[in-house]
Amino acid sequence: MGSRTYRSRRRADAAAATRAAILAAAEELFVSRGYSCVTVAQIADAAQVAVQTVYSSAGGKADMLRELLLPAVSDPNIDITMRAIAATDDPRQVIDITARGTREAHEVHWSTLAAVIPQCPSEPAAAAALEAATTEYVKALAAIVERLDQLGALRADLDQRRAVDLLWFHLGQDAWFSLVGHRRWSFDDAQEWLAAATKRALLADPGD
């Protein structure tokens, strides 16, 4: 019984290691060559496995892309951010916490996000993976707007839907890609400016 359990654990560990190697190879190739230019055969070659092993362990290209995007949208920092927001009654602090949380989620996964996401819209399968990730991002922003509304902090001319749109504009993926990726701002400078701009856009009393 013990020997059988040991062999089963070894097989599971080997399968997990193979999957990790495949995903690491896919990430490196997607970043260096572009998603559309990479084939499953190239991923298999880089991971030193058979093509069929790639499909059975990690799926097709879109499956691998979805798996690579998942850490950004399921980062433990997101839960920490949401708990911190729920614990404060200061609307300005809610924005500051959101800016810091979205900054950290992007900074940790920057090499993958900045290189891969801009390529996704032109590839249907990749676009679907990105849309699923974006949906989760927007759900989190909607919960933050609801918290601001509960605090009576939103500008009088904003309903929740418009407020979510403005929060996405100021702290969504494109905001970070624009300032940090395209304009080469530091994450510190981008966080400070985006937080201040978000307060002016959303809050009835933006403060200083």
Image (spheres, grey):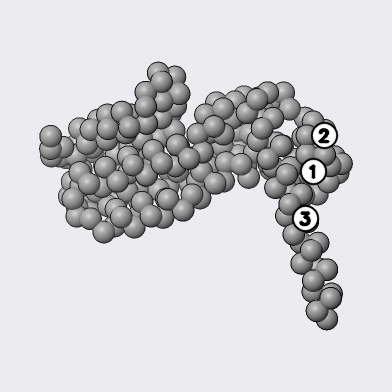
Vertical arrangement, residue 177 with respect to residue 22, above or below: above
Identified by mark 2, the residue type is Asp
Amino acid type, residue under disc 3 in the picture? Ala
In the drawing, does residue 164 fall left or right of residue 43? left
Mark 3 falls on what kind of element? helix
Distance from the alpha carbon under mark 1 to that under mark 2: 10 Å
Residue 174, by quadrant, is top left
- Circle number at residue 151: none
Depth check, front residue: 23 or 122: 23
Nearest to viewer (mark 1 / mark 2): 2
Residue at 76% x, 49% y is: 18
Residue 162, given in percent of the width and then of the height, sits at: 31, 37
**Badge 3 or badge 1: first in the primary sequence:** 3
Q: Which of the image's four quarters has the N terminus?
A: bottom right
| The one of 59 and 201 positioned closer to us in this rendering | 59
Q: Is there any visible trace of residue 129 in the rendered image?
A: yes
Residue 179 in the image: above or below residue 162: above
In primary-sequence order, the first of circles 1 and 2 is 2
Q: Is residue 6 left or right of residue 114?
A: right
Side of 152 relative to 112 (left or right) = left
Residue identifier under label 3: 15
Q: Which mark is residue 45?
A: 2
User: How far apart are the two marked residues, 3 and 1, measured between alpha carbons?
Assistant: 11 Å
Residue occupying image coordinates x 48% and y 40%: 108
| Residue pointed to by mark 1 | 54
Q: Is residue 161 left or right of residue 31?
A: left
Numbered disc 1: secondary structure: helix
Residue 23 image position (x, y, % from top left): 69, 42
